[in-house]
Amino acid sequence: MSHLLEVQDLKVKFALRFGDLTAIDGISFTLDKGERLGIVGESGAGKSVTGFAIINLLSKPGFIAEGKVLFNGKDISTLPGREMRRLRGNRISMIFQDPMMTLNPVFTIGTQMVETLKAHRNITTREAEKIALEKLRKVHIPSPEKRLDQYPHEFSGGMRQRIIIAISLLNDPAIIIADEPTTALDVTIQAEIMDLLQELCQEEEMGLILITHDLGVVSQVTEKIAVMYAGKIIETGDTQTVVNSPSHPYTQGLIKSLPGALKTGERLYQIPGMMPNLTAIPPGCAFNPRCHLKEEICVKDLPLLKRTEKGIMAACHMI
Amino acid sequence: MPYDIEDMKNNTPILTIKNVVKHFDISGGLLDQLKFKNGRIVREKTTVKAVNDVSLTINKGETLSVVGESGCGKSTLARVVMGLYPPNAGEIYYKEDRIDQLTHKEMLPFRKKMQMIFQDPYASLNPRKTVKQTLEEPLRFHNPKMTRAAIHDKIMSVMKQVGVDPAWSSRYPHEFSGGQRQRISIARALILDPDLIVADEPVSALDVSIQAQILNLLMDAGRDRGLTYLFITHDLSVVEHISTRVAVMYLGTLCELAKTEDLFATPAHPYTRALLSAIPRVGETRPKNIKLKGEVPTPVNLPTGCVFHGRCVYADARCKNEVPKLLKLDTGTFVACHAVEEKRNMD
């Protein structure tokens, strides 16, 4: 059976003066209907670039160097701009981090929603408004009729993010890619938005790719997780298995370093050092300079993703 | 921090905040203030009521965290404490001395004792000063008689303590990563050997693995130097890990003040309950968060009575009209809520 989305050995490079910089180095994953996948990692791990690469929204000098992005079995990474635009915001939508930056401040949200609909479908403004109202209701915006005529600054941060979700839903997409959708929001609002996304995936059988640095959010919302480090997926599998008993030393370190697992005041576990700069990724396993299990082979050979006895995939020589 | 819980029995307040009020006038010029109402032109001022009647004490050696959502006035409170904003009303005491009405000159000895760490390590370091220049400025300013050698030694020892290689002292901030910069900010705060450190979201801009490093550093420095922390943050798992006591703020008002264990085990105020239930925790699937109705009102037009009543499921007529007072429960927790006071059923 073909997957809804299948990313195969994707490589994204940035053409810079001193040569190509590899931001994503051969990642593969799949997403099925109604499935929720979390991509986690620290800043610079390549998680956002992955999201942009899927909908081919990489801005120059970034480009897809190798690999395929199969949407319903068809490679969309090589589609010409025109055809890609037909998919983007239609079959595959993206939600960004900052809700104030994504909405145009000088148009009412009604105008922006109608515009999105008309770009993809041949319908009248009145029909478009009806769909817009329905979607606003779906994301639980109170009295949506009044809200259509309001400008983005008249909404709170949480409401704006709901509107953005409503806009991304307008054309009933098959996949939503959410890039840190709640990082700019407060915890109580974050919980509401996450509930909403989860509800939508279940009701509409939408696939969700949630890109975030917050392991707590991922563990609550997603079924499948991919942990990225320096442009590679280093561990992937069932979310609960990975967060409860991580296999890769990096994932283990990340989970152990979270406050909350320990008693108050105890020293937190710390992973020494920091993620390498993409221009200077160490040979062998990229994590080797920070790893406490490091042996000779880690410096020489690149570890590949292998299935562990827990049923998840991890890229580490020591497993 | 808990290693000081023994000390806490002495309960010597290092800082006392009494009924502090801070409002910001945002009405602009005279013409902006004129409004047309009931057929006449009236002049109206618009104020943001950031902090309303907050009282707290911070005891020596403890870590008091102030939590709340954006706009609840927690950062304003920190800045009022530091003397960066003058309060509109209320009193602030450092040990026994009142410090909120001092002149700039009178304030100087207290500035040495109270230092601040800011959220964004990219914005809080001067990009045109080397690490050494950044660190020596407060030393020279507060100790004009200090010799060059002594200044140098002090800088080297503090840099070592915060984990920045002293050999890098002639580098500029842009040459450091976010975590390293935050270490330099901490070094700047520690260099005057303060008693109290006010840390405003010191780890919010950092990645998880770096966050753990910085929290460890703050806890170590607290232990080694016997520091007292006023910790401002919105991250409740950080709060749970490092604080002795927690103050929960909502819309400029203190709603609950409790020992950390008590607050997380048995939150009393309905807002605290909702806030705690919203923390995403690793290893839990289904969020069982308590939903709040409505939205946070603006601090320009504060609701009457209890500021939380519009979003509270337990609110009644009394909550709408009467401002709840901080009430001490048997557990030692302070809470401002009519529902708790009347023992309304809240399950």
Image (tube, rainbow, N blue to C red):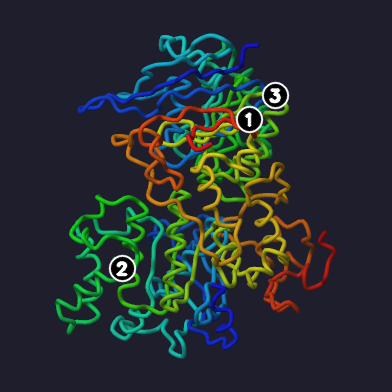
Which of the pair B311/B69 is nearer the observer? B69
Question: B332 left or right of A29?
Answer: right
Quadrant assignment, res A289: top left
Does A86 appear above or below B108? above
**Residue extending furthest toward the bottom:** B96
Which of the pair A282/A60 is nearer the observer? A282
How far, Cα to Cα, is label 2 from label 1?
A: 44 Å
Does label 2 lie on the same chain as label 3?
no
Total marks drawn?
3
The image shows residue B37 at horizontal and vertical percentages of 55, 56
Helix, strand or loop at label 3? It is helix
What residue do we see at 70% from left, 78% from top?
A: B332
In the rendered image, which residue does mark 3 sit on?
A204
Label 2, residues with CA under 10 Å away: few <14, some 14-19, many ≥20: many
Does A61 appear above or below B256? above
Chain at numbered mark 3? A
Quadrant where the C terminus of chain B lies? bottom right
The numbered mark, 1 or 3, whose residue comes first in the sequence reads 1
In the rendered image, which residue does mark 1 sit on?
A36
What residue do we see at 17% from left, 84% from top?
A: B145
In the rendered image, which residue does mark 2 sit on?
B188
What residue do we see at 31% from left, 62% from top?
A: B184
Q: Is residue A40 visible?
A: yes
